[in-house]
Amino acid sequence: MSVYRRIRIGDLVSVLSLDFAEEARKAIQRLPLKDKADLPNERRSFFVCPECGDLGCGAATAIVVKEGDTVSWRNFGHQNNYEDAVLPDSYKNVGPLTFDAAQYERTLLQVRLQFGLPIKGSNRKQLGRRRCSRGRRSGPSNRQR
C-alpha cells in the first residue's frame, strides 16, 4: 500500500510533484537528510497544497530518522510554516514507517532521474509558481521558515 493511501492525506499532493519541480528537487535533498528540514524541530513536509505547494496552506509532516540500515518517518502531524503548532490528531494512527536505508536512497535517486529534476547546484530553469486560490494561507508566501 502506498504511503499516500496509508496516511489518508485527503487533498494534499506529494512534495515530489512535478508541478513544483524546484520544491521537489529540494525535497529529494531533505528526505534522505542531506539538507536541513523545511520546518522547525527537524520536521519535514511530505504532502502539501495541490494548488501552490506552499507550507502556508498546511502540510502533512513527520520527523525523518536514520538509524543504521533503516530510515523511519515518525510523529506524523499537520502543520504550516507560520505557527509553531503540530496537529497530530489526523495522523495519530500512522507510523512510524520504516524503510531500508539503501532502498530509500535508491528510490529517491530514481525519482530524481525519472522526473529529470536537477541535482543541487544545477542551472536548470525553474517552473513558475502558481498562486493558491484556497485562501487559507495567512503566513509567508514562500516555503522557507
Image (cartoon, grey):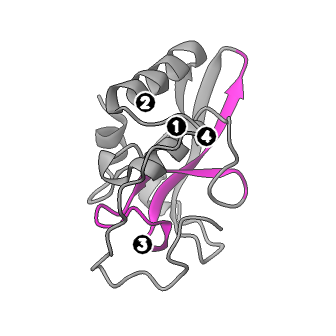
Which is closer to the viewer, label 3 or label 4? 4
Instruction: Give the image location of residue 34, x and y in percent.
Output: 68, 35
Q: What residue is pinned by disc 4? A: 121
- Callout 1 touching callout 2 (CB < 8 Å): yes
**Residue type, mark 3 in image:** Cys
First-in-chain label (3 vs 4): 3
**Residue type, mark 1 in image:** Ile
Q: SS for tag 1?
A: helix
Q: What residue is pinned by disc 2? A: 112
Q: Residue at x 49, y 17 (%)?
A: 106
User: How many numbered marks does the figure carry?
Assistant: 4
Q: What residue is pinned by disc 3? A: 57
**Residue type, mark 4 in image:** Gly
Most foreground residue, 77 or 47: 47
* Relative to 110, residue 61 above or below: below
Is 15 included in the stretch rendered in magenta?
no
Q: CA distance from mark 2 to mark 4?
A: 14 Å
Q: What residue is pinned by disc 1? A: 28
Q: SS for tag 3?
A: helix
Q: Is residue 10 visible?
A: yes
**Residue type, mark 2 in image:** Arg
Which is closer to the viewer, label 4 or label 1? 4
Identify the magenta region: 41-68
- Callout 4 touching callout 1 (CB < 8 Å): no
- Callout 1 touching callout 3 (CB < 8 Å): no
| Residue 48 circle label | none
Local crowd at mark 2 within 10 Å, few (<14), some, or many (≥20)? Answer: some
